[in-house]
Image (spheres, grey):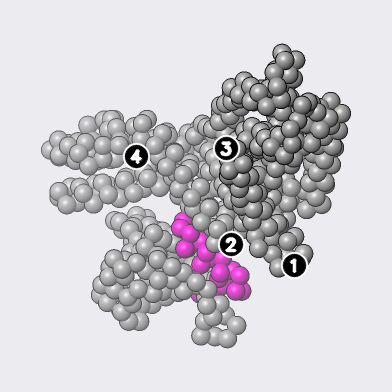
Amino acid sequence: MKRNLQIKFGVIVATILLCLFGIFGLPTSLAQVKENFQKNIHLGLDLRGGSHLVLQVQLQDAFMATADVTMQRLQEELKKQGVVLPPMDRNSPATLDDADKIQINVHGVPVDKTSLFRNLVAEQFPDWILTPVSSADYRMTIKPSEAIKLKQDTLTQTMHTIERKINALGLAESSVQQRGRAEAEAELLVQLPGVDDPARIKALLQEQAMLELYEVKDGPFSSEQEAMAKHGGVLPLNTKLVHAVARDGQASGYYLLAMSPVIRGTDIRSAHAGQGETPGRWETDFVLTQEAAHRFEQFTESNIGNRLAIVLDGSVISAPTIQNRISDTGRITGAANEQEAADLALNLTAGSLPARVVVEEERTVGPSLGADSIHEGYVAGLAGLIAVVISMLVYYRAAGINATLALVLNAVILIAALAYFDATLTLPGIAGIILTIGMAVDSNVLIFERVREELRAGKGVAAALDAGFSKAFLTIIDTHVTTVVSCAFLFLFGTGPVKGFAVTLVIGLIANVFTAVFVSKTIFDWELSRKRVATLSI
């Protein structure tokens, strides 16, 4: 009997030490105890304060970009087959609801090339539905199944890109998740604990940072009309006119660029801010991937003396002349300060957004409001705990001490689990802790009432304890499993705060099975082993 008790007490002591280590670590001073506790227990936005943003992803941008790439590829494939068509065009959906109504218009397909054209679209562009409008004109619309896939892929890619940007800023305990289940909503919920001035963060998240390098065919022009007039009112084949912003001493205007970029943002391996040749001037240096570097080296070597346009988010920011062969590095000048250069580097490294994002909702929770929530939750939990302890001591006498010890250990295990799992404690999480107190008391009440029944039936103390715990165990498991299943649905279908409540409650329930059954029974057995007890104070 004693050997069995020693093993049980060893398990309990090891559990307590493990929990204390998870919460406080190995502090060497009282100040470090507090520091480690704050470091290991992560507070959510509603407790710590911070910013709450709801971003709407403009899915129509992704559809238009997909259509542009499709038109470019189709022109190239037809050219390989000896078919040169007039420039294709597409519509421009203005809203999310119209995003999947994207349409490509193909004009002037020769009658003798109709079969070749249709076969090419069917084989190499299976995501599109080809519909004849006339004998020489066709309309291409995206398939419904592909439209759904493109929407979800765009949302997922946007979410991952925003996560990379936030992580690069070193913002801990931040979260990015899709709000709602319908892709039509296209909303992302971004929570940034500890950020009370979200202006810079919001600007970073909204910036697409789509970097492309194009060969310059002509320009700059002061206006679109000037560019069109120089080329007889029609742009040369496989070219486009792009606006240039006033930057770094360069006047605004328009450049005639090649239709296809030499380098895209996806070709960038890394980027960082650095000081330029002129003191006090900052620039953003970037390094290309191995494959892109080889391609860029070939291009620059054969285009020495020509200009190369650096296009960021659809605008030309610089059009330098290629002086010599360039392999894997490049730079973007004109940053106003170090932060602007660093922000651009961060965006380039994180990757460009596949579509614009618009801030639909913005809320800021101040640290004082979070502190008030913590204080109120602390007071509520402490008041409930005191009331429960007094009730247990009055009603169950000495056995109530047993229940109180199990209750305290339950709370310690719960807090330690949050620390070990890097879980974030929110206000609903505190509600889960308070509810766990109630569930723990319920378990003790079930056990103690069962023991009372056995004692009233005339059984001895040891036999009554064994019977009471074994009979109550199945009931406790049944109630806990039912609650855990409910929490699983809350976690699967709930938003962040609801998930926090579910996680906290599940951890508390699992800890409660250990404390109410194993720990409580061990304390009773230890008391019985110390002396022969004729009656039980219960």
Which residue sits at x=67%, y=53%?
A: 20
Neighbours of disc 3 within 10 Å: few (<14), some (14-19), many (20+): some
Dot 4 corresponds to which residue? 104
Of callouts 3 and 2, which one flags the residue occurring earlier in the amino acid sequence? 2
Q: Secondary structure at mark 4?
A: strand
Dot 3 corresponds to which residue? 179
Query: In the orientation shown, which residue stands out farthest toward the top?
Result: 457
Which residue sits at x=46%, y=74%?
A: 285
Q: Is residue 190 above or below residue 328?
A: above
From which residue to which does the magenta span run? 332-352
Q: Secondary structure at mark 2?
A: loop
Label 2 or label 1, whichever lies nearer to me, is 1
For the C terminus, the quadrant is top right
Which residue sits at x=30%, y=50%?
A: 72
Q: Is residue 516 left or right of residue 134?
A: right
Q: Which mark is residue 169?
A: 2
Q: Which mark is residue 393?
A: none
Of callouts 2 and 4, which one flags the residue occurring earlier in the amino acid sequence? 4
Of callouts 2 and 1, which one flags the residue occurring earlier in the amino acid sequence? 1
Dot 1 corresponds to which residue? 29
Asked whether residue 428 appears in the rendered view, the answer is no
Measure how far apart labels 3 and 1 are at the Cα level: 44 Å
Task: Please state which amino acid type lies under the numbered disc 2.
Answer: Leu
Q: Position of residue 417 (x, y in %)?
A: 61, 46
Task: Please state which amino acid type lies under the numbered disc 3.
Answer: Arg
Q: Position of residue 275 (x, y in %)?
A: 54, 80
Magenta part mainly helix, strand or loop? helix
In depth, the one of 534 and 117 nearer the eye is: 534
